[in-house]
Image: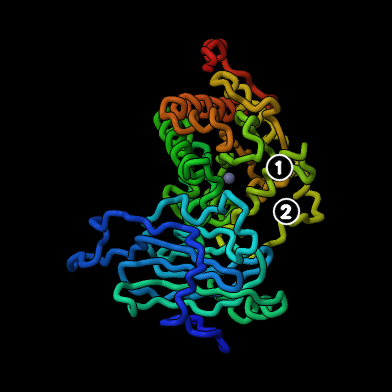
Amino acid sequence: MDEMRPTGAGPSRRGGRRAPALRFAAAALALALSGAPAAAGPAAPEPVSSIAVRLEQQKDRARLVFETTAEVKPSVFPVADPYRIVVDLPEMAFRLDPEVGRPAKDKRGGDDLVTSFRFGHFAPGRSRIVIDLARPAKILRAESDSKLGSPRLVVELEPTDAASFAAEAARLAPTVSAAPAAEPPAPAADAKPLLVIDPGHGGVDVGAAGPHGEQEKTIVLEFARALKGKLEADGKLRVLLTRNEDAFMALDERVRVARQAGAELFLSIHADTLGETSVEGATVYTVSARASDSEAAKIAEKENFADRAAGLERKSEDAGEVGDILYDLTRRETRAYSHVFARTLIAYWQTVGHLNKNPSRSAGFVVLKAFDIPSVLLELGYLSSARDLSRMLSPEWRERAAEATAQAIERYFDERREPAQLQASAPSQAVATTQRPQ
Ligand SMILES: [Zn+2]
């Protein structure tokens, strides 16, 4: 099932009507072609690049065209809940404006079949395009050819009914999923404690976006790297990142990697958006079955959507409650330590300022559900807040915030070494008196 040419496909568009009413929803980019690989010599072949993309929509038809540097073999299938079309490809370098594909700001295209699309790394050697639909669609055409002179990947869709969509989804469901990440090295004997830092999103899952195409996946990775650098310089802990590049990783895979590596603390880093631009500041989340408030519930819902943003099917977001007393005891202790660390982290972040007015919250984050690893999710700020955004893009701010986070982590592990102690730690006086910026 490489190339999907669904049976009974609609009329071929090749050489068909030119459809003057087609709306240009995304501009083809005039990127300099100098970077395009083409003939790269006998060394390892460079991945095919996508150098421009456009989305054309009219009432009963949508066509997404990627201009590429070579033909590729797409594998296309629908996924429901919500309605999406997934296009799997060999590794592709998307030399495209990151803003392209985002939902249109104006709502004039209310009839449009395609609401948005995204693209990026999915698994080693594999890339993916995910097309979000307003309603069920049928794949009329999904192919790559050079018939118009230069290589193009064309995906053409038309509306269909829910039952047909579900039948196609079942028929074309891929047999391979994202490959699990490489096994982390086994911990050495008498090793220092291991912290796993989890930069949210990555690859085809871009996470939240700022008003000028700033991407959550990039901001959180930069922060995670800065934090790792500080902790390694101090030398008290071992640090592992769940991802250290712009790569997709499923939520439960992040937890699995942490457990496999023997993590003693798991810190997930994010930066979401909210509809309200006035809400700002960092928030520290722990897991709970019931969200602490409606904003926390909204954030958890968006963060838990990450896998589906990458085209995966909805999974049970249940923690897999096992009626086992040892499990319950472990989980209770884990959650108590998660709270201790969350409070310590908030105390240290007070020294760098700009916490959310309610910085301690909880909700049902999938990525925090390891029953045996204290886990906390830090939202650095909101991309929807101009002030938060400018802070998060500032290298100076990142250094300060990563330093405060590193100190909180080290303090937490220091306290854990002392038996029978289970309370949050405040930063030392010297740190606490640091000037609060802005
Ligand atoms: Zn996120």
**Tags 2 and 1 in contact by the CB under 8 Å rule?**
yes
Tag 2 residue: 319
Query: Does ligand 1 reach within 8 Å of label 1's beta carbon?
Result: no
- In the rendered view, does 173 fall on the left or right side of 97? right
Disc 2 element:
loop
Could you tell me which residue is drawn at 63 percent across and 38 percent down? Answer: 376
Q: CA distance from mark 2 to mark 1?
A: 10 Å
Q: Position of residue 46 (x, y in %)?
A: 28, 64
Which residue extends farthest bottom? 8
Q: Is residue 12 left or right of residue 375?
A: left
Residue 58 placement (x, y as % from top left): 56, 68
For badge 1, the amino acid type reads Val
> In the displayed structure, does residue 335 sit left or right of residue 34?
right
Tell me how many marks there are: 2
Which numbered disc covers residue 287?
A: 1
Q: Residue furthest left?
A: 41
Q: Amino acid at mark 2?
A: Ala
